[in-house]
Amino acid sequence: MRGTTALGMALLAIAVGLMLGGCGGGGGSTGGDDDDDDGDGWTQPATGPGSAVYDHTGVAVYQSGSTATDYWLYTPTGPVPATAPVVIFNHGWSALTPSYYEAWIIHLVRKGNIVIFPRWQSYVGDLNGSSFLPNAATAVRAALTRLETSGPVTPDRTQVAVFGHSIGGVLAADMAAAWATLSIPQPLACFSVEPGTVSSATGVTVANDVTISDFSQIAAATLLISLLGEDDLLVGDTLARQIYQESTTVPAANKNLLTVHSDSHGTPALTANHLFPLASVDGANVDALDYYALWKIGDALLDAAFRGTNREYALGDTDAQRYMGAWPDGTPVTDMTVQ
């Protein structure tokens, strides 16, 4: 059948892409810095959201197990804080370990956040979509309980954010909408990056796809960013726009739909495809798309939600929000567009 072939080919492309894009990484590393270690000319911003100004020198990593309801925990060290805000980081389809996103995760932790990385899938290729959200919520609850009983850092349940990429981007929005039903803390911020489902990625309706919540249930006070890549040919823009448009309780001042653009001014080109958020801890594939579209926006969203600062970097169609840095020769990278 044509549909079955298309589904198989698309899923294979997702899995291969994740493996190629997510090589490297490892627990306990201190992570990114502002050095151009790979010689590509990109340097991390010196100040502000997304910058190399860190409160902590390293991280501690804990893995609970390897089932669909297990999780990884990342907590700051050097120094170890008594308490810290929590970022729930939901991975993309079949990216079952944090290595695929570890450069960004380490950055978030060194900024002073606990990161909970729920596994939510049983195995690579797991298509039991209706279980993904409850699995992730179970993992989050277990991770919070461990932190509160065993440390090393006590989670601040009043300062929680949900981030996610691909199917994880859908799960992030689901958690922001259904947190009470899921018995997890209410997220103050939601960052949904290139959200998509297996159905949207393949063009074939999958009967047991990931849950799509009622996004009108996302609270008005939630700060919400839905982000899409200009050249994301895998999941496109449907879910990103749906999350933005259907989160009707959230006022316009508290949310934006961002489009990250590709830019071929230099070599290698910056390509805003579905795999651009993947970046291993060695920093070899970290570039302006990471520093400005993900790290800057994510940091600023947390600052605005938790501390009431740096809102102009996260929301409002400002110069600071749209800015994407510059090529090594000083030419500005194409700005994000904001809705």
Image: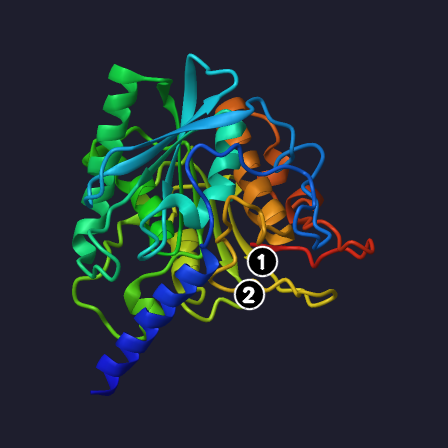
Q: Are marks 2 and 1 in contact (CB under 8 Å)?
A: yes
From this viewpoint, is residue 31 visible?
yes
What label sits on residue 230 in the rendered view?
2
Task: Give the answer, above or below, for where 233 lies relative to 192.
Answer: below
Residue type pointed to by label 2? Glu
Residue most toward the top? 82
Residue 325, image x and y in percent?
Answer: 71, 49
What label sits on residue 181 in the rendered view?
none
Side (left or right) of 272 relative to 46: left
Residue 204, image x and y in percent?
Answer: 27, 75
Residue 39, image x and y in percent?
Answer: 70, 52
| Secondary element type, mark 1 | strand
Viewer-proximal residue among 92 and 211: 92
Task: Give the answer, above or below, for where 14 lies relative to 41.
Answer: below
| Secondary element type, mark 2 | loop
- Quarter assignment of residue 218: top left
- Quarter assignment of residue 335: bottom right
Residue most toward the bottom? 1
Viewer-proximal residue among 219 and 20: 20
Side (left or right) of 14 relative to 103: left
Q: Residue at x 72, y 35 (%)?
A: 46
Q: Mark 1, residues whose alpha carbon is within 10 Å: few (<14), some, or many (≥20)?
A: many
Name the image quarter holding the C terminus.
bottom right
Residue 86, image x and y in percent?
Answer: 39, 28
